[in-house]
Image: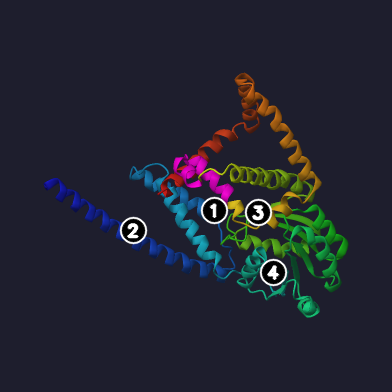
Amino acid sequence: MEITHKLGALREQIDDVDKNLIELIALRLKLVKEAAEVKKDLGSGTFNPERERFLLKSRHDLAAKYDLPDGLIEDILKRLLRESYRQGGIGVFPCAQKEAKPVLIVGGNGGMGKLLGSFFKNSGYEVRILDKNDWADAESLFSGVGTVIVSVPIDVTAKTIEIISRYLTVDTVLADVTSVKTGPVNAMLKAHSGPVIGLHPMFGPDTYSFVKQVVVCVEGRMPDKCEFLVNQLKIWGANICTCKAQDHDRAMSIIQALRHFTTYRYGVFLAKINPDLQNILNLSSPIYRLEIEMVGRLFAQDPHLYADIIMSSKDNADLIKEYVSSLKSELDIVLSQNKEEFIKRFYFARSYFGESAQSFLKESAKLLAKMQDDRS
């Protein structure tokens, strides 16, 4: 009975500490919100990498003085920082232009168009939308705009650029946000004599913040005239990656087309053999649960988008064909129970990843620990 009473007393103390923690977290978020307003007045961007590095290092050192487990404070602080960035993502941002001209988003009612529109509005720009039912008003919508962003499906991007070119002035900045760059950038350069830049946000429209999100920028024409657009993305917190259109598309064949195809095929195969999904989840390890969630995530989204990405070029089709053909030799190894050859190829792949393999092992362990924490 005495032990039970002692446990109850300790739990009450723990509850009091938790209450204090919650109050302190609420206070911290309030201060962060106030700091965001000051940063706006100063014209500062949402994300300051030097400040984040300082926070993580100083708090790590402080935690060490109290003999706290390694990584504990970093986990807590990173979650608080993520919430801070989320709050910043729905706030008001400085404008990268001294005199902001209207921004027209072609396809602005789509997911990415809406996301971009909200951030431009929150940065002081007048945002106009041209969607498929607005062509009768096209002339008035284009009147006086400074930037036009094309955010339409890949298969109609080139045609859309051709159609809107008649409404553009020589000073209009023309950009696109499709996931391929060679075709759209060439189409913009052909259709428009003014400033051109290709953009590819490496995230979906369900994103609440640009902080640390990669946006690929492909130079087209007159980069000095497009610089404000890149700076605006940086103000929102984006990580800008500049590359050539051909290099981007070669990388996307692997990053997007091949990866999405293998995920798609795995999901279709599961649907065909029809295992009990809940039973699979109940029995799964953290890493398999993460994998199955990534597969399921794809099928919760727009199939037209993924069809466009996978089938956007012959290079994609050729790479997928090469991948599928390579599976035959791997299957032969399994069917023949040739463990020696399997291990030989395993080490061949390991040599490709090099030191990154160990780094990936550590990084993925953090993800899996988080997965396990969230498991009911």
In the depicted structure, whether residue 182 falls above or below residue 357: below
Q: Closest to the observer: 95 or 275?
A: 275
**CA distance for labels 4 and 2:** 42 Å
Which amino acid type corresponds to the residue marked 3 in the rendered image? Met
Residue 70 falls left or right of residue 357: left
Badge 1 density bin: few <14, some 14–19, many ≥20, Cα 10 Å: few
Q: Please name the amino acid that badge 1 sits on.
A: Glu
Q: Earlier in the sequence, mark 3 or mark 1?
A: 1
Q: Nearer the viewer, mark 3 or mark 4?
A: 4
Give the residue number, with chain letter if any, for mark 3: 202
Q: Which secondary structure, mark 1?
A: helix
Q: Name the residue located 19 percent from the left edge and 52 percent from the top edge.
A: 8
Labelled pair 2, 1 in contact (Cβ < 8 Å): no
Position of 202 compared to 54: left or right? Answer: right
Return the disc, 4 or 1, that comes first in the chain's sequence: 1
Q: Is residue 83 magenta?
A: no
Secondary structure of residue under mark 4: loop
Magenta highlight range: 277-296
Residue 289 magenta-highlighted: yes
Residue at which label 2 appears:
21
| x 26%, y 53%: residue | 14
Pointer 3 and pointer 4: residues touching (CB < 8 Å)?
no
Q: Earlier in the sequence, mark 2 or mark 1?
A: 2
Camera-near label (2 vs 3) is: 3
Check disc 2 and give the amino acid type: Leu
Amino acid type of the residue that numbered disc 4 sits on in the rendered structure: Gly
Give me the residue at 69% from left, 32% from top: 327
Marks 2 and 3, how far apart in space? 36 Å
Distance (Cα) linking label 3 and label 1:
23 Å
| Earlier residue among tags 3 and 4 | 4
Q: Which residue is mark 1?
A: 50
